[in-house]
Amino acid sequence: MAPKFVVMISDVFSKPSKAMREAMANADVEDSMVLALEAKCAKLLGKEKALLVSSGTMGNLLCVMGHCQERGQEVLMGDKSHLYLSEQGHVAQLAGVFPRSVPTLKDGTHDLTTLAETISTSGVTGECRTKVICLENTHNRCGGKILPLDYLQKLYNLAQENDIKVHVDGARILNAAVGLGVPVSEITKFCDSVTFCLNKGIGAPFGSIVAGTESFIKRVRRCRKALGGEMRQLGMEAAAGLYGLDGAEETLQKDHFLAKKLVNGLKSLSSSVVTIEPEEDQTNLVFIKIDKEMSFITNLTERLMTTTEAEVKELGKEIRVGCKLWGKDIRFAICCNNNEEDIDDAIKKVCYVLRKFISEIIKD
């Protein structure tokens, strides 16, 4: 029997379903499909215009460039945000914009008083002038947390009072909408620009969307050209996005259900070494916190990808689980390709391996 591989490394590895592949195969390759996708996304997000770009990283950079039309301006972003930690500092490297970090709270928000004190709009000769506040919703490194609507409104009011823009890295913003039970436009009305990924929750093989006002998207389109991001004959990719969006709510509800099933199945592992908090799980990301040195955690994640004869005998099958390290946290990302059997197998595997590791610690 072939090994069972449960892929939860990242939801970016989601694969198109058979029906999505059929929609792609039958699509017109011309740009009309792209225009249809952009129009659908603009309406979904409650914005005037939307633009298809190659990735969320490109989308975030383009939005900063679209808002900051002079070099030497400043953007505020969380010190645990993807934009700050995982995009090569591209706003400085390529756009000439200074990224200033602000502390990220446990729930993915920022203290508004601290944020207000960090904003610089005085025009003092030696200071960068704050032009944009960047948020992340849902927040990856904070465990897929959803930013509360009342917080978003207060932050947006603060930004408007200071004549600065709000950009949302919304790679998983559809997860936020499903988690809150509101249309995504109820979230995005508190920002000036937003990106979201087509290849995470909805399973399309390619692309991200940028949305904002018509004049903003015009500037972003021009910046996209300069970065080599203008693309042609993407009808098949656009068809995948259109198909995925039609069933997105149901798909994401399933992902959230499976994440809750996983975290509840693992909570018995909680100990002085392992922290699992089911009440902290809000969307499709499950985090396990390990209070040990990095070599232990690395060995643990590598062990989840191997099997032993004794293990196969006890579990009844060969199971391998792919996950990702975030510092001393282990992250499991549920995507549209996972099902209940996958989660049941993952629970068996993780519980088996972690209990073996913990028992070894006790012996030592």
Image (spheres, rainbow, N blue to C red):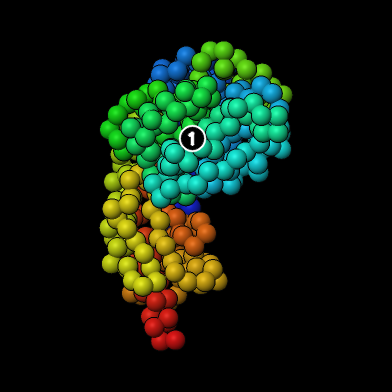
Percent x, y for residue 66? Answer: 61, 22
Q: Does 167 sit above or below residue 8?
A: above
Residue that sits furthest to the bottom in the current view: 363
Task: Pick the quarter of the image with the N terminus.
Answer: bottom left
In-front residue for pair 146/255: 146
Q: Residue at x 56, y 29 (%)?
A: 132
- Write down the quadrant of residue 186 in the picture: top left
Q: What number of labels is visible?
A: 1
How packed mark 1 is, by other alpha carbons closer than 10 Å (few <14, some 14-19, many 20 or more), is few
Q: Does 266 sit above or below residue 358?
A: above
Task: Pick the quarter of the image with the C terminus.
Answer: bottom left
Q: Left or right of 69: which side holds 277?
A: left
Q: In this view of the protein, can residue 209 be seen by the observer? A: no
Q: In this view of the protein, can residue 289 be seen by the observer? A: yes
Q: Residue at x 42, y 25 (%)?
A: 157
Percent x, y for residue 10? Answer: 48, 48
Q: Amino acid at mark 1?
A: Ala
Q: Residue at x 37, y 28 (%)?
A: 153
Percent x, y for residue 2? Answer: 44, 61
Q: Does 266 sit above or below residue 206?
A: below
Percent x, y for residue 344? Answer: 31, 58
In-front residue for pair 240/133: 133
Q: Secondary structure at mark 1?
A: helix
Query: Can you identify the residue that label 1 sits on?
Result: 116
Q: Residue at x 53, y 13 (%)?
A: 214
In-front residue for pair 291/229: 291
